Amino acid sequence: MAVLERAHLTIVQEVAREGSLTAAASRLNLTQPALSHAIRKLEDQLGVDIWRREGRSLQFTQAGEWLLAVANRVLPQFTHAEERLGQFANGERGKLRIGMECHPCYQWLLKIVSPYLDSWPQVDVDVRQRFQFGGIGALFGHEIDMLVTPDPLFKPGLRFTPVFNYEQVLVVGPEHPLRNAAFVLPHQLSGETLITYPVPPERLDIYTEFLQPAGIAPRQHKPIETTDIMLLMVAHGRGVAALPCWLVEEYAPKFKLYPVRLGQSGVAKQIFVGMREADSGIEYMRAFIKLAAMKNPAH
């Protein structure tokens, strides 16, 4: 079975464009005998005549006209693909798929994505929250390109960059007895309704770093998906929540909220952006991390 190659299509197109073997050979940087041999070999491989000679010129057969139409349609796509792949290689174009393991970070992310899109007009951004095998698995599986997380897992092949620090605090409403407390201890939450994002307790800092080490559980755990509704519930005395201090300060003008330190020393956290080591040389990905580190929501 004959294999049609890009070089064959180029020959067909150049012969049609130049109208003679001599001119086509010159354009293709070939000698005329070499081009004649290539034409004969192509026709032998395909088992059909592509040209017929009329005096000194070559005229396309019906099969040749069809092949020329294919060449005119396909060759520009090759050129376009090569240009785009060159841009990928130089970090100038692509799609940045960002995975989020930090529910409160969406407002912060928007402040990064907007100027990023202005700076990189040929890079698209997509944000994903649900992963087939978790955020780390999504990175390894090329389901996402970057992972925003407060809980990095340092494994070979991955690179995590800290982009900002924050303190996790308890959030209470204006009528809550803890609103003016300097800090809260785990046992003081045993009778509370704890409102969180819909994340398993083993991935929530309020559980893993505060309640569970003390052997304490809240009276009720109520998952709520949106930040606004969560804080509205807290402001109306329907429960308490644990959120980054910077987020509480951001929403303070909108809701009556009071942050309380978790324990005497507080719960200090960092947000990391993770990526595959193999992608660390891609310019537009490095630019995103640099911009992320500049947009500290606490400032």
Image (cartoon, grey):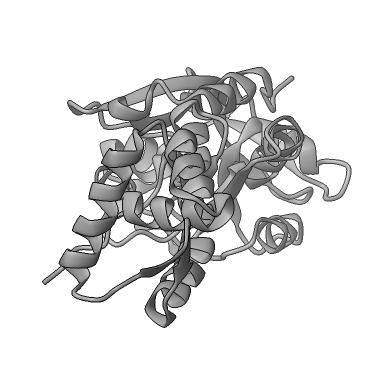
Whether residue 70 is visible: yes
Location of the N terminus (image quadrant)? bottom left
Q: Name the quadrant containing residue 169.
A: top right
Residue that appears at 19% across and 63% down: 3
Location of the C terminus (image quadrant)? top right
Which residue is farthest left?
Answer: 1
In this picture, residue 171 sits left or right of residue 132: right
Which residue is farthest front?
Answer: 55
Which residue is farthest bottom?
Answer: 62
In this picture, residue 293 sits left or right of residue 135: right
Q: Name the quadrant containing residue 238.
A: bottom right
In this picture, residue 113 sits left or right of residue 160: right
Q: Residue 74 at x, y = what percent?
A: 47, 61
Residue 229 vertical position relative to residue 39 in the rendered view, above or below? below
Residue 72 vertical position relative to residue 24 in the rendered view, above or below? below
Q: Residue 198 at x, y = what percent?
A: 46, 62
Whether residue 149 is visible: no
In the image shown, does 223 or 36 lie closer to the viewer? Answer: 36
Residue that appears at 45% across and 71% down: 60
Q: Residue 213 at x, y = what percent?
A: 27, 36
Residue that appears at 59% across and 47% down: 125
In the image shown, does 239 or 70 lie closer to the viewer? Answer: 70
Which residue is farthest right?
Answer: 253
Q: In this figure, what is the number of numbered marks?
A: 0
Residue 210 vertical position relative to residue 230 in the rendered view, above or below? above
Q: Residue 184 at x, y = what percent?
A: 53, 33
